[in-house]
Image: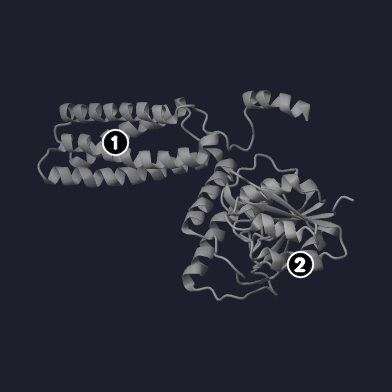
Amino acid sequence: MAPQISVILPTLSEADNLPLLIPRVAKALAARTYEIVVVDDNSPDTTPETCARLALDYPVRLIVRKNPRNGLSGAVLEGMAAAAGEYLVVMDADLQHPPECVPALLEPLERNTADFALGSRYVPGASMQDTWGPLRKLNSWGATLLARPFAKRASDPMSGFFALRRSTYQQARRLTPIGYKIGLELMYKCRVERIAEIPIHFGSRAKGESKLTLRQQFRYLEHLSRLYDFTFPRSSAIAKFLIVVACSWSVAALVAWALCAVGLGQGLSILAAYPSALAVVALFHARHVSTQREFIVTARPWRDFGLIALAEWVTCAGAVVWTAWRLDHAGPVESFLLAFGSATVVRYVLRKELFQDIRGLRRELRREEFDRERPNNDME
């Protein structure tokens, strides 16, 4: 008999918590047909043995990802793809999410008053066991604010405790999560309109160590970057370009000023400072390539970057020579802006020509992409 409900538990070194959590899930769903899908990211602990013992008494199924990608989000998506239930429930395995609230989470979906149900820490009736300090509160507030364009009216879009129908999940297109905020990705890309927030008591981790590291917070920013690229493909690319320009110009201006101060000369200082701007751009480019490689159209992003950088530097040199020849009394600021402005225009034009932007995250496919994907769609 196919289960009505699939509870998906992404895990990483949670072997000590599973024997505490799964009996509570089973008790909460005692009157239902359900399955518990544990998706483990190749933990170095005894998770397989623990799940094997629990499977003797409970409908537990273990999926081990030998080469996990995209962190918790990837684990959840793999669990959803393997789940058999009509309703999909996602929760953490560290006992911070109360399994006793799963029926309440399912209720608005079963009554068809919502398409997506969130276990919320911030609605009336909710509570938290741990008292957050000012820094943690500020961090949570900032993360929620950045996610606001994708969070509809939800007060706790960062929640990892949620439920949705399988049919809602199947509406999603081009899921590209990274990190641990898969609920936000699904909420937005499944195009849900009706969201129900269920108050929960957010508990303390039972055993083990928290996975919320600084690296995970950076991955959350990368995830938001992907969502902004998907939602605002043109304005997002322009905003990122301007941020890189501001950072690189600031560093180069300091270098040029220092070189002028030691007597190198105005033109030579500007020309010698341009590699420092390219170094800053290279750092951003390296991050872009490492996190967005699957969406980059060009096959040789670093070769193209080198060609663009060389063209920029030649343009900068030409602008310096032209300024010295045609403008007798140009000051250092004017010379800097003219040289760097010319080089940046060349960068922008060549980036577009060599496809040095994120073209895989647009809301709709280009015609040629649609034609490439059509055979797969026809087969389905």
Residue 82, x across and y down, in percent? 74, 45
Q: Circle 1 — which element?
A: helix
Mark seen at residue 23 = 2
Q: Nearer the viewer, residue 65 or 100?
A: 65
Dot 1: within a 10 Å radius of its alpha carbon, few (fewer than 14), some, or many (20 or more) residues? Answer: many
Q: Give me the residue at 62% from left, 61% from top.
A: 14
Q: Mark 1 points at which residue?
A: 340
Q: Give me the residue at 22% from left, 44% from top.
A: 255
Q: Nearer the viewer, residue 6 or 318?
A: 6
Q: Give me the residue at 61% from left, 76% from top.
A: 129
- Can residue 152 be spotted in the picture? no
Residue 287, x across and y down, in percent? 44, 42
Q: In this view, does 154 lie above or below 230?
A: below
User: Is residue 315 rendered to the left or right of residue 173?
Assistant: left
Which amino acid is tagged 2? Answer: Pro
Q: Which residue lies furthest to the right in this view?
A: 1
Q: Nearer the viewer, residue 313 or 79?
A: 79
Dot 2: within a 10 Å radius of its alpha carbon, few (fewer than 14), some, or many (20 or more) residues? Answer: some
Dot 2 or dot 1: first in sequence order is 2
User: For the residues marked 2 and 1, what is the alpha-carbon distance in whole angstroms?
Assistant: 64 Å
Which amino acid is tagged 1? Answer: Phe
User: Is residue 89 rendered to the left or right of residue 337?
Assistant: right
